Image (tube, rainbow, N blue to C red):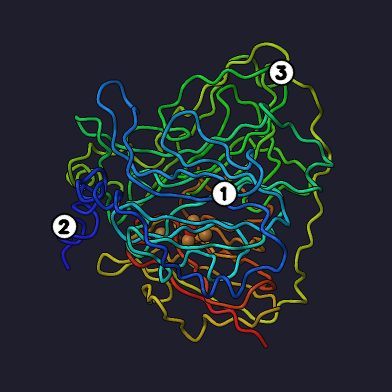
Amino acid sequence: MKRREFMETTLGVAAGALVGCDACTSAASTPPQVEVAASSSLSAAPASPVDLEVVLTAAPDRIPLLPGQPTDVLRFSASIAKGARDALVQPASGYLGPTLRVKRGQRVRVRFNNNVGEDSIVHWHGLYVSEANDGHPRHSVASGKQYLYDFQVDNPAGTYWYHPHPDHRTGVQVYAGLAGLLVITDDDERRIGLPDGDQDISLVLQDRSFDANNQLSYSPNPMTGFLGDRMLVNGQLPQTREVRSGPHRLRILNGSNSRIYKLGWSNGSPLVVIGTDGGLLAAPQQRTEIALAPAQRIELWANFGADLGNDVWLESHAFDDPSPAMGMGMGMMGRGGAGAPGVPQGAPLRIQRFVASGDGRQSRVPDRLVSHSIPSAAEVSNTKTFATRMQMMGWLLNDRSFEMQGVAANEHVRLGTVEEWEFVNPNGMMPMPHPIHVHGRQFRIIDRQPGPGFASLRQALFDEGWLDTFLLLPGDKVRIRVRFDRYAGMFLYHCHNLEHEDLGMMRNYLVEAG
Ligand code: C2O
Ligand code: CU
Ligand code: CU
C-alpha cells in the first residue's frame, strides 16, 4: 500500500470522523447495553469483597482549550458506585480523565462504558492484572457496550495510567483526549512520609496540533509518528503553576503519542529522581537531565523556593535526532494532513513554569526509599531476542506484525520463571527510537550496549528502577530481566510510539502455567 493511502484510510480520515463527528454524538446517546466480556474476568476475580467500584465512561465532549471556539475531544469521566469518594480526583480543567487513587491490596471493579463511536477498551498501563483485565484489543467492545473489570491492586505505590487500547485506533483515541492517571499508595510509601496533599503534583505531558477552528488535528507520519506544535500539560495549555515554598513530589507522565522529552530545570539544578514506572527507587538519584519516552513516568523531589528558586521552568532540552526521516520528513510531515507541521523531535521546549511563595510543609529528601528484590542472574531460565524492523510502512518485531491471537514460538513463557529479553534496534535505513513496553510486568534493565548516534539524548537515559517501558535507541541492544510470576495468559509487548503500535509494532506473549 502506498504511504499516502495508508495514512488517509487508517489515520487521517478516521481521526476527523472520530473527533466530534455527528455519528459519535448519536452513538453516545444510545443507552449502553449491559453486554460484558467479563465472564472470563469474573472467573479470575479475587475472592475478597469489592473495595471500590467505579463507572468509567469514554465519550465525546467539548471543552475550552484555546481562546475562542471550544475543542471537540474524547474524554473519560467517572463516578463512584461503591467506596471512598476521594478515590477519584476530577481535574479542574483540561480533557484528561479523573485520577484514580487506589491502595495496594484493594479489590477494584470498573464498569467501562464505551461511548466513543467506535470500538474501544481500557488498558491499565503498568498494572499486574489478569489477561481479561488488561485491555487487550481482542477484548474491545463496540460503542454503546460495556466491559467489566475486576482486579486486585497488586503493584507498589507509584504513578500508573490508563488509556484505550483498540487495534489500529489507540493513537487516535489517546490523541483525542482519552487518558488518565492511576495513583497507587501503600504502607511502605506511607512510612517514608513523602510530600503529599497539595505538595504532590502530577504533570501529564502531551503535544497536540490545532486547526484554525481550534479543533485537534491528527496527521501522523508513519516514520516518526505524531509530533504536535503545542505543548499541553494535564490536558490544557500550561499555566504558570503557583506552588508553596517547600519540597514537592512531582509525578511526570509522558502521555504523548511519539514525542520524547529530555527533562531539565531551567536554572540547571539537578533533577532528584525518587521513582520510575514501577514505583519508588531504592534511594534517590540525581541527574542533570532525564529522557522520558512515551508512556514512561518519572517521579521527582522538587524543592521549590529553596534549591529550585522562586521561579523555575521544567523544560525539555534540545537533543540531536539523526533519524533520516526527520530531515526528509519535515516536508512530509507538513503535508500529512490539515495539521501544521509539528515541532521536530528533539527541539527545545518550555513545559511548565513554577512560581513559589508562602510556606509549605518542610521535609528532607529521604536517604532510602523502598527495598527492591531484583531477580538474580542465576534465576534466569531463558533468553529471547527481539529485533525491530521497518517494512512497507509497517513496523515489525522479529519480522512479525501484530496478530490478534498470534503467538510465535519465541513468545511463550513458563509461569513462575525469570527470563531475559534482548531488544535490538538495528541501525539500518530507518534509524528510529522505539519506546518498548511490556504489559503486565515491571522489569529491570540489565545491560545496554549503545548504538552510535543520539549521543545528546543517550546521556539523559535513566535505566534504573522498575520499568514497564524503556527507550530503545537506534543501534542499541538492551537486555531486560523479567519475572513472570503473576498470571498465566496472553499479554502484549509493543512499541509505545502509538503510531508504530497502530502500524503493527505489537505482539502477544503467552504465559503458560505448569
Ligand atoms: Cu500503555 Cu499496551 O500500553
Ligand atoms: Cu501497558
Ligand atoms: Cu517504534
| Amino acid type indicated by mark 1 | Ala
Q: Residue at x 25, y 41 (%)?
A: 217
Going from N to C along the chain, the mark reached first, 1 or 2, is: 2
Q: Position of residue 362 (x, y in %)?
A: 79, 22
Q: Residue at x 54, y 21 (%)?
A: 241
| Amino acid type indicated by mark 3 | Ala
Q: Nearer the viewer, mark 1 or mark 3?
A: 1
| Residue wearing tag 3 | 306
Q: Position of residue 51 (x, y in %)?
A: 68, 54
- Dividing the picture into quadrants, the one containing residue 331 is top left
Question: Which quadrant, please, contains the C terminus?
Answer: bottom right
- Dividing the picture into quadrants, the one containing residue 259 is top left
| Residue wearing tag 2 | 4
Q: Is residue 347 left or right of residue 419?
A: left
| Residue wearing tag 1 | 81
Nearer to me, 476 or 162: 162
Q: Residue at x 61, y 73 (%)?
A: 44
